[in-house]
Structure formats: structure tokens, C-alpha cells
Image (cartoon, helix red, strand yellow):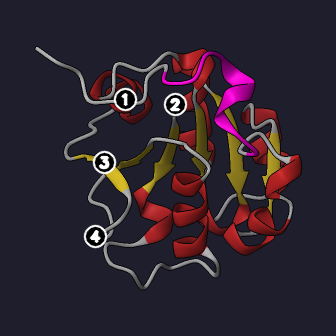
Amino acid sequence: MTVISAALFGTDWRPRLPGGAELLRECAARGWTVVLTGPGPAGAPALTVAAPGGDPVRAALELVDGEPSHAVAVAGSVREVLAARRAGVSCVALETGGDAGPELRVAGAVEVHRDAAALLRVLDDSLLARPRAFGRVGAGTGPRNG
């Protein structure tokens, strides 16, 4: 599953980031279950955590009964990178959230990209290349029953 900060992408299909909508679509097309932390784009191929509170990554994991080892977070701030780290989720960071690459790396980001368009250009070589790299197919990919 991919946990993506809705703060980076806005609340409709006019994302704040160049390549934002394309990144969401491509993650979904590659088989990721995309969970947006916060209100997401209308019609997005994603589930949303309506009220993530202080622990949005854990809330996203719980939403889909996901495992941290099968997830990647896309964050735009040191605060979001730290939330992913606390949850045990690998993190790809985008510098468009206001924090610089070195700060994001110190906080725990495995990769740092200028923006969503830059990440999209190297997606095949990133943590988001394909979900199978993280475990069995289908792990943490559906809503929780019960």
C-alpha cells in the first residue's frame, strides 16, 4: 500500500504538485492500494483517512489492515516523514512540502525527490516501483472486514 499525504495533492483533480494526479494514477495502476491521509481528490483511485489526527500513517495502515513492511509513505514534510518512521513505514519524500532534502533525509526519508513529476520520471527505480517487492501479492490491499 502507498500512504500519500493529501496535503501535497490538494482536494480535487487539480493537485498542488506537477505530476500529482499522474503519480496517484500510476501507483494505483501498479497495484498499490493508495491511502490519502486527509481529504483526498474527488474520484481519486484512493481510500482516504478522514480524520488522521496525530498519527496519519498508522490510521492509514489500520484502514486497510496493512503491514508497515508492505507500505511506502509519500511525505512532504519532516513531520510526515517522522510519522512514517514511527509507524515503521519506509518513506519517499518530496521537497514541495517546504522542507529541504537534507532535513527530510535526516528525519528518515529513504528517497527525496523535487516533486511528484520528478518521482514519476524515476518511478521504476524507486520504492514505489511495484508492491510485490514488499511481500506477497494482496497483503494489506483491501478494506478491513469486521
| Image position of 139 (left or right of 94) | left
Q: Position of residue 64 (x, y in %)?
A: 33, 27
Direction front: furthest residue: 137
Please give the name of the residue rendered at 66% of the width and 68% of the height, measured from the top-left corner. Answer: 96
Q: Nearer the viewer, residue 36 or 109?
A: 36
Image height check: is 34 above or below 89? below
The secondary element bearing badge 2 is classed as helix
| Alpha-carbon span between mark 3 and mark 4 | 10 Å
Mark 4 or mark 1, earlier in chain: 4
Q: Report x, y in % for residue 70.
A: 59, 22
Query: Of circles 2 and 3, which is in front?
Result: 3
What kind of residue is marked 4?
Gly
Q: Nearer the viewer, mark 4 or mark 1?
A: 4
Dot 2 corresponds to which residue?
A: 83
Range shown magenta: 129-138
Q: Residues within 10 Å of mark 4 (few under 14, many from 20)?
A: few
- Proximity of marks 1 and 2: CB atoms separated by less than 8 Å: yes
Whole-angstrom CA distance, mark 4 to mark 2, is: 26 Å
The reply to whether the C-beta atoms of the residues labelled 3 and 4 are less than 8 Å apart is no
Numbered badge on residue 9: none
Q: Is residue 88 visible?
A: no
| Picture residue at 68% right of the left edge, 68% below the top | 116
Q: Which mark is residue 47?
A: 3
Report the number of numbered marks: 4
Q: Residue beneath label 4, please?
A: 43
Distance of label 1 from label 3 (alpha carbons): 16 Å
Residue type at numbered disc 3: Leu
Q: Secondary structure at mark 3?
A: strand
Mark 2 or 3 closer to N-term?
3
Q: Earlier in the sequence, mark 1 or mark 3?
A: 3
- Callout in the foreground (1, 3): 3
Residue 125 visible to an observer of this rendering: yes
